[in-house]
Image: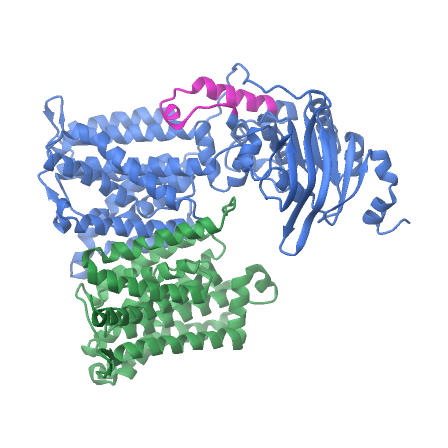
Amino acid sequence: MRERYLIPAFVAILAVVPLLPVVPEFWITLLNYIGLAAIVVLGIVLLTGIGGLVSFGQAAFVGIGAYTTAYLTTAYGMSPWLTLPIGLAVTGVCAWIIGAITLRLSGHFLPLSTLAWGISIYFVFGNINALGRHDGLTGIPVVEFFGLELMSGRRYFYLIWFFVLLAVLATKNLLDSRPGRAIRALKGGGVMAESCGVATERFRILIFVYAAVLAGLSGWLYAHLQRAVNPTPFGIGPGIEYLFMAVIGGAGHVWGALLGAGIFTVVEDVLQDVLPALLGRSGHFEIIVFGVIMVLLLQYARDGLWPLILQAVNHAGARRQVPAAPPLPARAKPQAEESVLAVRRARKEFGGLVAVNDVSFEMRAGEILGLIGPNGAGKSTIFNVITGLLEANGGEILFRGERLNGLPPREIARRGVGRTFQHVRLLPAMTVLENVAIGAHLRARSGAVAAMLRLERRQEAQLLAEAAKQLERVGLGAYLHEQAGNLALGQQRILEIARALCVDPVLLLLDEPAAGLRYKEKQALAAVLKQLRDEGVSILLVEHDMDFVMGLTDRLVVLDFGTKLAEGQPREIQTNPAVLEAYLGGVA
Amino acid sequence: MDTTIAAILLQDGITNGAIYALLALALVLIFAVTRVIFVPQGEFVSYGALTVAAMQYGVMPGTVWLLLGAGVLTALLELKRAFGAGELRRAPRILALYVGYPIGLWLLLRSLPLGELPMALQIALMLALIVPLGPMIYRLAFQPLAEASVLVLLIVAIAVHFALQGLGLLFFGPEGSRTQAFTDLLFDVGVLSISGQSLFVVGATALLIVALYLFFERTLYGKALRATAINRVGARLVGVSIPLSGTLTFTLAALIGALSGALIGPITTIYYDSGFLIGLKGFVAAIIGGLVSYPIAAAGAILVGVMEAFAAFWTSEFKEVIVFTLIIPVLLWRSLTSQHVEEEEE
């Protein structure tokens, strides 16, 4: 089952269903509600399943969209086609304001805050006189389409599902693009993405606003379908239900949104009939069943039902060729002998522990400098101070004469500093190629809207070609479409080097690149690094494999307990008594 | 507004705040030990209050069926585990604990004239009914997911809240209930008259907090929980079992919640869905304490209660909006004071 057959088949079925007289009116109504929910849930898939931001408050945004059009069409007689963009804009601005305040919150505070504002907005709807308080607004006009009144459910069906398909396509396109990769890195790859130059908080706001605008769209459709609004469907309960739909369908998958919305809506409808009859009294008892289903689902099939379907039909991801494309512009490399990095009396303390104690050293263009020392010497801490993950307590970091202190990691990446991590940081579910393309994030400008409309395909091809080129260079050319998580650990480290090379670095910081490599692989890696040096790239290297270090580096800096012990050429270091003392505990 | 009204509002606020403080403590405790953001904490409150109310009407509270159902499911899980581990000799104990106990309690409740019992006994029976639900919920919903991320656990917590709220509707119906007052005493202090009920609530809260403090400082189990909260892996390595600490925590949380229900029952009319909002106010307080600090959470709870009382006086429709919007500046302040690039789990 390939996706390119799925969409046309889906469209064909949708186009025919309302025309068939055998399809009962009631089914059409149900399908309409599935469509309305699916639009909201698509936003949650992007926001929660892919971006990792949990929101229980999406129903409030549906409400903002619905009330905006309800108020403007009834109080001012505006055309629904005019209130559509207004409603989306109002929803988007509200989301932007809420997002700007709350999205900086760490993991679990964020979903709690969505409960809070979700409830607040619901009570606001219910207590404003102009919005009819708890009775809401009625007499909302019918949508007209070139003189055709979309009055019946069968006609309105087309309007709803047109927007559903539009939202599906826009979301899929967005995910498969430069901003899409940044979005997919938000969950579990924040530090890595920042180090590649991704402004993660901008993308968090972006998906939050996107999800809210989809919710607002659903609200507009809802208002003109029902032709009346009241606060009930916009409370926190429905907000939670939208999240449940996403989890049921598969929060990480675009089609999971439709599946989840469909299953939930149908089951809810059945339960609302069956349960009160069974229990002999009326009430929304279906929430008991949904609560239990959700607990079981999260215990036994946490990724929802869509992945199970994919598994059942033995779905293999599409393997596209990487198209040829003109190379991305590269920055001019520094002149030979130019000072690239100067670390001056850098200091980093954690509480009482001095991890880096007034360390100074300097690097010139086209030099490989090894940073060695026993475990706990402060090597990785220095890396993190240079790349902005940690802020130095004292001293100065100069990169090509410019002070880096206080700059965030992404600004340091922008200046041409690429790095790898001691503990590999990559996105295991994404392909090797996509992981590496994140490194080239700053070398293109294409934004989310262009991506949704597929207007950035030239640039996208360039980015992927660059990623493929760097992967070939480090010897992973055969694995472009493999899931990154399937690579051996040594290969994952090499992948990180390719990603760092995509930054187009002047300075490359490699944290134990040879760990987990076999002898031949180490030799190949050394050859690549030497070639980079000859091209004018400076490389700062932390490594424990002494043969590798001694054969490759031009100079060494030795650290012990955060203090610089020695500096010099590999030969000198090998005979330095202080170094031998630190490594061997006394000269034998 | 004059001083008298202000004093009455303050008294109301502190009384409610005391209950929010208890809930906030339970929430902080559960989060620290099990990483579960336990949204259904409020359901223990409504179940507690409504179970007492049902007894006072002389009706068998429906929660006894929930206890029996949850008990049977728990027993099945435990039997399966015991069978797998070849420890079938534990079967009688499991059955007695999870099935025998609920049946025994049901028989006891059936034989008693529930409506005529003294209130203390009604509350004791209610606790015997509600508190075991805590560890059972942990066993059924959370223990199989002990290693899941905070966000997965949060969604499970929301799901449990859904199920419990629906069951609440089934057991207690849509009508609200209020339980009888503990005392009709009124103390006149100057212009102010302090109700005995308020004193009772604040006093009971203070007593519970002291008891919890002693539990955590003086007992081995309390120290084990604290150790788990500080370092889960470390606690495990020295022999604190995760299921045990989870069970213990949920038992405590259910006890705190059910007692809060008994305390709030005579003050406010409680509906099957009141627990959610009450619990969320506990959350606002817990969040003020960053979900880690007990004293700040307790102070935050008093603040929430007082704000709510004054908001209700000035603009009653927007009471909830004001209370829940309070969380935003708090969160903002929290996020401004902790600035670092964060690596999410998973």
- For the N terminus of chain A, give its image quadrant: top left
Instruction: Specify the colour of chain B.
Output: green
Out of B11 and B327, give the one closest to the viewer: B11
Q: Residue A397 in the image: state x and y as whole percent.
A: 65, 37
Q: Is residue A522 visible?
A: no
> Which chain corresponds to the colour blue?
A
Vertical placement of A244 versus B99: above or below? above
Vertical placement of A575 versus A482: above or below? below
Left or right of B269 in this view: A325? right
Out of B50 and B85, give the one closest to the viewer: B50
Query: Which residue occupies the extreme front position in the image?
Result: B2
Vertical placement of A560 versus A170: above or below? below
Vertical placement of B203 versus A127: above or below? below
Stretch of the chain drawn in magenta: A443-470
Which residue shows up at 32% across the image and 44% down it? A245
Q: Residue B253 in the image: state x and y as whole percent.
A: 40, 68
Which residue shows up at 15% across the image and 31% down it? A154
